[in-house]
Image (spheres, grey):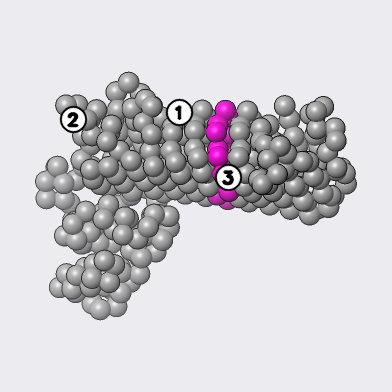
Amino acid sequence: MSNRYYEQLRNQLLAHHSPQEVEDMIAYLQEATEESGLAEEEYLASLGPIEEVVSYFEGEEAKTKEASLPPIPSQTNKSLYFETLKSVLISIPNGQIVLQTNDVAQIRCEKGQEFLNILQEEAKLIISAKPQSKISLFKKKYPEIILHVDLPHNLDLEWLEIHSVNAEMKVIDQQASSARFEVVNGNLFLENNNFDSTKISSVNGDIDIVANELGTLRFDTVNGDAKLQSCRIKEGKISSVNGKLILGIETNSSIRVNTVCGTIKTEINKQKDFIFSSIPGSQMRFPGTDPESILKISTVSGKIQFIE
């Protein structure tokens, strides 16, 4: 899709711009696609028809009010549409994302609605941010968006994926087979979610996870603290660089902990048989009831603390 898409976009832009200007615009769109974190095909589809994408670069107003605003479902079809969802993908560059359940399923945008793209397919919802007009193309890439997505109670998704840069992310009361969260320069809060598989990546932000079933977990954080409280993990890996890990977790897996210039502390009496040392560069092991599963925990220049 992408080669044909960019070729069509290039041909339309060449009608009003020099070849070099067009290549700069294409390069910017490719960069925006990569930074969205979404798959290229999904991000480009969320932008709408190529004619609308051209208008972003031309700095033109959308021809109609309906085209300038995201197609948020009307009150009459909200419940029917949301109850069929199997995948939710969101990428917001700046602001706040709140994903939760509600008696009334809906998409609400408190700020920046004009910057939103919303693609609704039969079982998929994709929300992303529009590229900026050419006037501000290289000056302001990240408009502020405050987005609330309320999904029906007990909706069981196959895939949940959220990316944010310079934004706060909150995800509450969700169920999904696979969940992925990527946060840069922002904080992440997860509460009362149930995932079979979870992938979390954070840079320059704090993470607070309360009462979650995380399943198979892949967790990476750089320059930020993370607290997991009352969380159940099947197996996986937790990795931290320059941050503190506070872990109140339940698992049947064997736990293996390694630190580089980091320390380990436990406040759990039943884990007195932990093999560990509080000095930097220490290791710790604790056998689990499931010999086939392992939870690996590592830190560089940080502290690991186990709590009840």
Give the image location of residue 159, x and y in percent. 40, 44
> What residue sits right under mark 2 in the picture?
77
Q: Give the side of residue 45 with respect to residue 287, left or right.
A: left
Q: Is residue 29 magenta?
A: no
Q: Give the side of residue 232 with respect to residue 16, left or right.
A: right
Disc 1 is placed on an element classified as loop
Q: From the viewer's perspective, is residue 190 above or below residue 126?
A: above
Residue in the picture at 73% in, 39% down: 288
Mark 3 or mark 2, whichever is nearer to me? 3
> Disc 1 versus disc 3: distance between alpha carbons?
18 Å
Which residues make up the magenta segment? 201-219
Give the image location of residue 214, x and y in percent. 55, 38
Q: Nearer the viewer, residue 170 or 26?
A: 170
Direction top: furthest residue: 103
Residue in the picture at 79% in, 54% down: 260
Q: Give the side of residue 71 with respect to residue 105, left or right.
A: left
Residue in the picture at 23% in, 77% down: 18
Q: Nearer the viewer, residue 143 or 186?
A: 186
Direction left: furthest residue: 64
Q: From the viewer's perspective, is residue 112 above or below residue 151?
A: below
Question: Badge 1, how many Cα within 10 Å: few under 14, some, many 20+?
Answer: many
Give, as a three-letter code, the residue at label 1: Asp
Question: Of the numbered discs in the image, which one, if any, rests on residue 36?
Answer: none
- Tell me the quarter of the picture where residue 14 sits: bottom left
Give, as a three-letter code, the residue at label 3: Leu
Q: Earlier in the sequence, mark 3 or mark 2?
A: 2
Q: Earlier in the sequence, mark 1 or mark 3?
A: 1
> What residue sits right under mark 3 in the picture?
217
- For the question of whether residue 35 can be seen, the reply is yes
Task: Tell me whether the residue at label 3 lies in contact with that at label 2, contact meaning CB atoms closer than 8 angstroms.
Answer: no
> What residue sits right under mark 1 in the picture?
173
